[in-house]
Image: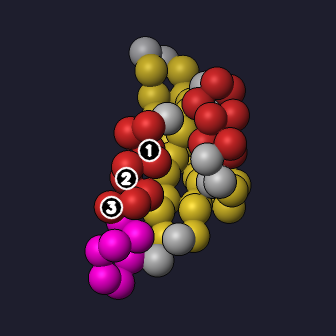
């Protein structure tokens, strides 16, 4: 959590950066909960974004506006 907060501080002070985007596997509910707690919001789903063995994994796309 501290690492992400330092990232926010760094990005906020970098001229021109207005938002941070990330993608997280939909089945990674712990990470999604953490990102939501940090202020990220869902803006879309990338279907079949990853493939592990023979199984596709959708990715949740999230954004945080600075």
Q: Is residue 23 above or below residue 12?
A: above
| Circles 1, 2 touching at the beta carbon (< 8 Å) | yes
Q: Count up the numbered dots.
A: 3
* Residue 14 colored in magenta in the image: yes
Give the residue displayed 46% in from the left and 48% down from the top.
5
Quarter of image, res 2: top left
Quarter of image, res 56: top right
**Tag 3 residue:** 10
| Residue 35 located left or right of residue 51 | right
Q: What is the residue that sits farthest to the top in this orientation? A: 53
> Alpha-carbon distance for marks 1 and 2?
5 Å
**Tag 2 residue:** 7
In this view of the protein, can residue 15 be seen by the observer? Answer: yes
**Tag 1 residue:** 4
Give the residue displayed 57% in from the left and 70% down from the top.
65
Out of 6 and 48, give the one closest to the viewer. 6
Q: Which residues are magenta?
A: 11-17
């Amino acid at each position: 959590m501290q690492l992400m907060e330092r990232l926010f501080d760094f990005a906020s002070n970098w001229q021109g950066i207005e938002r941070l985007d990330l993608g997280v596997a939909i089945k990674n509910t712990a990470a999604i909960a953490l990102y939501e707690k940090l202020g990220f919001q869902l803006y879309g789903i990338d279907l079949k974004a990853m493939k592990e063995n023979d199984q596709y994994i959708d990715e949740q796309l999230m954004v945080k506006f600075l």
